[in-house]
Each structure stands twice: as C-alpha cells, then as structure tokens.
Image (tube, rainbow, N blue to C red):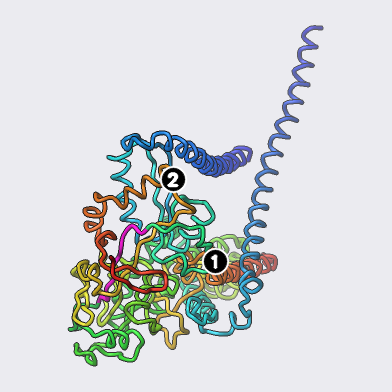
Amino acid sequence: MDQGRASERLLTQRKGQKRQSERKGKIIVYTAATITIVATLAVTFFLTQRGLQSFFVSGINPLEFFTSANWNPSGADPSYGALAFIFGSLAVTLLSAIIVAPLGIGTAIFMTEIAPRWGKRILQPVIEILVGIPSVVYGYIGLTVLVPWIRDTFGGSGYSLVAGVVVVSVMILPTVTTLSADSLKSLPDGLRDSSYALGATRWQTIRRVLLPAAIPGLLTAVILGMARAIGEALAIQMVIGNTRIIPDSLLDPAATMTTIITLNMGHTTFGSAENNVLWTLGLLLMVMSYILVLTVRYLASRRKV
Amino acid sequence: MKKKALFAFSGLMLTFALVACNGDEESNETVDEAASGGNDSETDSEASAATSGTVTLAGSSAMQPLIGAAAEIYMGEVNTEADIQVQAGGSGAGLSQVSQGQVDIGNSDLFAEEEDNIPHEDLVDHRVAVVGMGAVANPGVGVDDLTQDELIDVWTGEVTNWSEVGGEDVDITLVNRPDSSGTRATFVDYALEGAEPAEGITEDSSNTVRQIVADTEGAIGYLAFSHIDDSVAALSIDGVEPNAENVQAGEFPIWAYQHSYTNGEPDGLVKEFLDYLLSEEIQSTLIPEQGYISVTEMQVERDAEGNETPVE
C-alpha cells in the first residue's frame, strides 16, 4: 500500500516537475524573442523619428537632400545636399560587389568541388580567420600600404574611391566566400552523380548543373556582403579622403554616408539641423539595408533545391 | 536546446544587469553630488578637507588629454576621495550633455553662443586654457613663411601649386577637418578671415592629419600646437612664428579658448576641480607641458563675437 502510494506520488511529482520545466523553458524563450523584437522595433522607430526631424523640424527640403551635391551645413547659408555621399556609398558597395562576386564564388567552387579535402582543411580556417579581423585593422593596412602605393603608382594624394573599394572588397571577400561555399555544399550529391553519370565533365557539371542550382544561395552571399559593405565606416574613413564632392574618377577622393556620420556626429549639438541631417543619413542607411535583407528573403524563398 | 536557450538568456540578463548598473551609477552620482554639495558648505573654510564624490566631464577631444592629466594628478595628490571621469566625444556632444544635465562639465573648443540649440543663458563659461593652432605643410614644399593673403589663396584653391607662393613645383593637397569641427571653425575665422576652404581630404583626428601631411607630397593642414612635431613644417604667417609667446602677446591670431561649461554656477567638488584647473600649479606647469597655453598669461582677450581686446 505504502509503496504504491509513494510511487504514485513520485509519478505525479514528476509530471508536475515536467510541466513546470516546460513552463520555465517557454518563459525563457518567449522573453528572449520579445526582447529581440522590441529592440528591433525600438531602433527602427527611434531612427525613423530622428531621421525625419530634419525634414519636419529643421525644414530641410527632401528634394535638395536627395538631388543636390552641395553639402555645407555649418556655413552662413547652409545647404544639405547629400547626393555626393549617397553616390559614394552606392559606388563603394556596387564596385566591391562586382570585384568580390567572381573571386568569392570562384574560391567557393575551388573549396567545395575542385579540392574539397584541401579546401576544408586549410582554406576554410584561413577564410574564417579573415572574417574575424576587426575593420580598423583593414583600414590601418589600407592607410599604410595601399594609399602610399596608389600615390606612388598613379599620382594624386592616394586617398581615393578606389582605395575604399579595395579595402571593403578585402573585408567582404571572406563573408561572400563562406556563404557561397555553404550554398554549394548544401546541394544534394544526387545532382553531381547524375551529371557525371550522363557523361558530363567536371567543368560541365559545375557550370551547367551546380551553379544554376545554387544561384539563389550565391546571390544571397553577394547581397549579404553588400550589406556589410554599405554599413562599413571606420576602414573606409581612413582611406577614402572624405570629400564633399562627387568624384570624377576612381583616383579622386570621395565620401560615404557612414564616414560623414562618424566625422561629424561628435561635433554637432543634439537637435541642431546639422545633427538631424546626420540622423537622416542613418535612416537612409537603415532603409537600404532593409531593402537588401528583403531581397535576400525573396531569393531564399525562390531556392528550389 | 535547453542549454542553448539558457545560455542566450543569461547573456541577455548580463546585458541588462550592465545597463542597470550604468543607470544606478548615474543616479548614485547625483546623490553623491548633492551630499558633497552639503558637506562642502560645512567644511568650506578648511581647504584641506577632501570632498568625496564623482565629477563627469565630456566633450572636446582636443581638451581631453589636458583635463585627463589634470584629473589624474588631482585624484592622486590633491583629493584622493574624488572620482573624476573624463570622456571625449566632441565639443557639440559636450555642450549638449552639460545643458541636458547628463554630465557635470561640458568641454568645448567653441563658445556656447556659437552653437544654435544650446540654451547658453544657463551655461557658465570657465576658460581653463588656450590652444594655439598653426598651418603645417609637408617639409618638401620649400616654404616656411606665408602672408595671410597667400594662406587664404592656398586654402581657397586660388593657388594650386607651391611654386606660385615661392616654393617647389609641387601641387597643393589640402587636408581639412570636418565642417562641424571646432578646430576648423577657429582656423577659418582667424587664419582665413572667414573664407570657405576648397575641397580636399577630410580627416577628424589630429594624429591622422599630421600623418597625412607628413607623408603626402605638397600637403598642407592645420594642427593644434600640441600636435605639431618635426615630421611637418609649421608655417609662419606674415613672419610671425606659431608659438605660445606670440599667441600670448596677441601677435599670432589662430587660437581658441578651451571652455569648461557648467550648467549654472558650480558648487562642491565640481567647483573645487575647476578652481584646481585654474590654479597656479596647473596653469604654469601642466598646461605648457601638454602643449597648451596658460589662460592667465594671455595679454589679449576675446569674446564670443571674436572681438579682441587687450587685458587690463
């Protein structure tokens, strides 16, 4: 009798405990999710509110902001044309994507298809280390090696759009390579085997079968690289020269939205038009990265294999 | 899975704890201050009595090395009970934060009157030092003296080669500061007589500017005296060398006050620290050592509109 009761109690206790731990887990997970969502929404809301103040409170003409390249917020007759910085950000992002896409995807093919064992053992760890190097280090190397080299080879000051593009390309190359390799690795082996069985060579298999199948994943890799490029500030600021005009050539200095924010944020006072317009640049950067993320989601949903 | 969630959760909690700590610190600080203010009125007559508490300063990065060094000596030798925290962040941030009450003292290169959006009626100006600035060029340009008109021509892009102002045949590269920077405002007002500089490379940090000027052929920039060294050539203007004596005598025009602003008249530890900054000890030893100019030895005075008057 006693024994039976004890085991019964044990059973119910266990059940209760289980229910309790179930609830604990639920609370933890729900709290984490809520905090993440609230934080994201709060940042979005705050940035939108601050970013729009330059138009609604400081009375800056949005048309001027987007279409004029005349930036002089602290002059006697201030003007707030940000076109030169929008152009700079887009130029750096697109040019580095054009450089990095073939390099990154090529390396990924080498790692996964040509020399998978060697690639896995040596190339992958090296690339992962590259991802972890802080951007200020890339900037410093650019400042001490790349800029003097450009100055000696092509003339000018060396601080240039092309220096910014090269530094950012080196920074995003590991991201694009790693993600491309993941996407190629996730293709089912059946694809390769069937292609070879049909008598295709390795190159034919890669070009006609694997690459088309992996396209959504490869595009995702490049776009995530671009998202990193558009948000990069520190390394670019050290090498690009930060001028307020649209560059005539790759060898001219330029500026991006991020570098203008970091250069001026500390000097301006909260609530001034000069400060508000920097928030607007920040808002624009957020909108651009939202667009990139949405593109990634769309491409991921199209992934067939 | 469970472990992972727990790990993430504890990470979150840690973040929160840290945030909460920061908040606590801030509220403690105000309590301490109020307490120290009270203590101070009782022990005012005894100069040696240590007032404990925390003073936070933020603002001008040009002032940070000086104030930081002074705070270290103050905490080490004068008042071991005090905790003085010196942050940089820029003049604009310093003015904003002191007028919003986030810090006790806001450091600025500029007069608060020169900034819109700062309720400068409430702010009390304490001028703790003077910083002189000079135009510096790459040593290879072959020029060490310019007239002010030549300097303006160089900076506005009227002149694009050093040979036109008596130097070598090298193109001029301008190294500017961001348009919101206090250093730039001072240089534009007093060296260029308000003329807007032409476009060039723009960098914020004095060390970067010095490195670019030293490395780039034909480069010219401007630096505070404390950042000028042998790697660059400091240019005389109208034959007047950029040095502390000439600034004090009112002969070299490019200089600015280093302002420490408080929100209302200071009391307690804040007042004691400001008095210490103006004391003979700091003004005659630390300030020249750090490359600044003592405010007590200036023979000219300047107001927010830039009008200069002789002292006494």
Of residue A82 and residue B47, the one placed in the foreground of this image is B47
Q: Is residue A239 visible?
A: no
Q: Residue at x 32, y 79 (%)?
A: B191
Residue B101 pos. (x, y %): 52, 52
Chain ID, mark 2? B
Element marked by disc 2: loop
Evaluate whether label 1 is on the same chain as label 2: yes
Instruction: Check the image and name the residue furthest to the front.
Output: B312
From the viewer's perspective, tell me whether residue A294 is left or right of residue B23.
Answer: right
Name the amino acid, label 2: Asp
Chain ID, mark 1? B
Magenta stretch prevailing secondary structure: strand
From the viewer's perspective, tell me whether residue B14 is left or right of residue A127.
Answer: right
Residue occupied by mark 2: B267
Quarter of the image containing the N terminus of chain A? Answer: top right
* Distance from the alpha carbon under mark 1 to that under mark 2: 25 Å
Instruction: Check the image and name the residue furthest to the top.
Output: A1
Residue B53 pos. (x, y %): 43, 39
Is A25 above or below relative to B256? Answer: above
On residue B117, which mark appears?
1
Residue B136 pos. (x, y %): 25, 75
Quarter of the image containing the C terminus of chain A? Answer: bottom right
Name the amino acid, label 1: Asn
Q: Which residues are magenta?
A: B127-136
Q: Nearer the viewer's eye, disc 1 or disc 2?
A: 2
From the viewer's perspective, tell me whether residue A216 is left or right of residue B172.
Answer: right
Of residue A50 and residue A190, the one placed in the foreground of this image is A50
